[in-house]
Amino acid sequence: MTRTPSLSHPFLLGFDDIERALDRVAKGASEGYPPYNIERLPRTEDEPDRLRITLAVAGFAREQLEITLEENQLTIRGRQSDDKSRQFLHRGIAARQFQRSFLLADGMQVLGADLSNGLLAIDLIRPEPERFVRRIDIMSRE
């Protein structure tokens, strides 16, 4: 099934990247593991708006987790391997792998990440963009 372009209005110029981003987000929306929260942290005098993404990654050690930022896509991967030396009588906790991606807006920056009590917290900041008005001169071609 193909999606009908929603940003094809003649007044919306240069929004091709947003269209592709929407497609990418729609494809990744079906992922259910690991569960996560996104919260807005209070603004301080020193820092503008901050966000925190918290993923429930119980059973994963720091070495089994990887966080990458490529262009505007934040990707968190977890890799566990089976311990072949163990013999289970019942196996209810499987060794899992996951990949969860978030598309960040332009200007978003990753401050850092922390793993504590099975929760991986990734802090993001969005600096205030510089506002400016530029005058465009009109040329005469005669």
Image (spheres, rainbow, N blue to C red):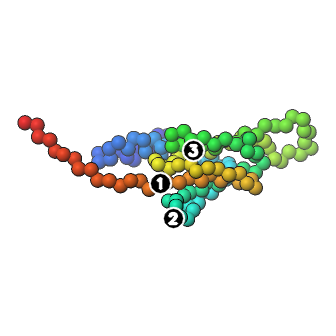
Residue 75: x and y in percent read: 60, 43
Residue contact between numbered discs 3 and 1, judged by CB atoms under 8 Å? no
Residue 64: x and y in percent read: 73, 41
Name the amino acid, label 3: Leu
For label 3, the crowd category at 10 Å Cα-Cα, with few meaning under 14, some 14 to 19 and many 20 or more, is: some
**SS category of the residue bearing label 1:** loop
For label 2, the crowd category at 10 Å Cα-Cα, with few meaning under 14, some 14 to 19 and many 20 or more, is: few
Q: Quadrant of the C terminus?
A: top left
Image point (78%, 37%), residue name = 81
Residue 127 - label: 1
Image point (57%, 44%), residue name = 74
Circle 3 residue = 74
Image point (89%, 45%), residue name = 90
Say left or right for 16 vs 31: left
- The mark that comes first in sequence, 3 or 2, is 2
The residue nearer to you, when weighing 53 against 113, is 113
Residue depth check, mark 3 versus mark 1: number of the one nearer the observer: 1
- The mark that comes first in sequence, 3 or 1, is 3
The residue nearer to you, when weighing 103 against 91, is 103
The residue nearer to you, when weighing 89 against 142, is 142
Instruction: Determine if residue 88 is in view.
Output: yes
Name the amino acid, label 1: Pro
Residue 29: x and y in percent read: 57, 48
**SS category of the residue bearing label 2:** loop
Q: CA distance from mark 1 to mark 2?
A: 13 Å
Q: Residue furthest front?
A: 46
Residue contact between numbered discs 3 and 2, judged by CB atoms under 8 Å? no
Circle 2 residue = 45
Q: CA distance from mark 3 to mark 1?
A: 17 Å
Residue 138: x and y in percent read: 16, 45
